Amino acid sequence: MKRLPLTFMLLAAVSLGACSGEPDAYMAGADDGAGAAAPATTTVAPDPAFVNDVATAGDKEIEMARIAQQRAVAPDVQGFADRMIRDHQQASEELRQALTGTSVVLTVDTDAIQTAGHTLADLSGAEFDRAYMDMMVTDHERAVALVEAKANGSGNAAVKQWAAKVLPTLKEHLQQAKAIRESLGGS
């Protein structure tokens, strides 16, 4: 008699998972025993707002880093800018690959990138270095929160996997940006 309630509870849990609002979402992370996720029979469409937001953020990091390569005076800031270009170009390409086969088209907010560029336009030398690193800390705090929420949340399996993969790098960027900012006398 004790088996019936346990069986009923398991059946109810599986049924609730199937009705979660995301088609076959309960299958998206199922382990096949070999350590790899079993493919879902129906995939959840990527969240266009998320992918466009992170694509814009990545392109902004690249553009601001290009400006920093030309204007930064501190070797640490120049090295950081080089890393931003390399890492964010790679992350953008990997995001595009994750979206292959979906109907989502990346749309980058060029106005946001231009606005950030205008913020740094009239600065040079140590003043530029501090403003750029302040921007990098703020931007990476936001990026870490956004990507961490996606990596730990629900949604398209490929986008979640991308988020989980890039999250450690974004956290490294944030820590490095804070250390460089502090070394420049920032807070």
Image (cartoon, rainbow, N blue to C red):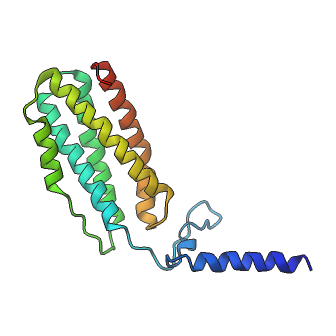
Snapshot quadrant of residue 46: bottom left
Q: Give how far across and how far down residue 166 sits, in percent.
A: 40, 49
Q: Residue furthest front?
A: 187
Of 164 and 184, nearer the camera is 184
Residue 38 screen position, x and y as percent: 56, 70
* Left or right of residue 2: residue 99: left
Q: Is residue 158 above or below residue 7?
A: above
Residue positioned most to the right: 1
What residue is rendered at 29% in x and 71% in y? 104
- Indicate whether 149 appears above or below 134: below
Q: Quadrant of the C terminus?
A: top left
Residue occupying the point 53% across, 70% down = 28
Whether residue 166 is visible to the viewer of this picture, yes or no, is no
In the displayed structure image, the side of residue 81 where residue 100 appears, left or right: right
- Of 127 and 76, nearer the camera is 127
Residue shown at 14% from the left, 38% from the top:
119
The residue located at (22%, 26%) in the rendering is 130
Q: How many marks?
A: 0
Q: Position of residue 108 (x, y in %)?
A: 20, 59
In-front residue for pair 118/47: 118
Tell me which corner region of the image, top left, top right, bottom left or bottom right, holds residue 78.
top left
- Residue 184 appears in view: yes
Q: In which quadrant will I find the N terminus?
A: bottom right
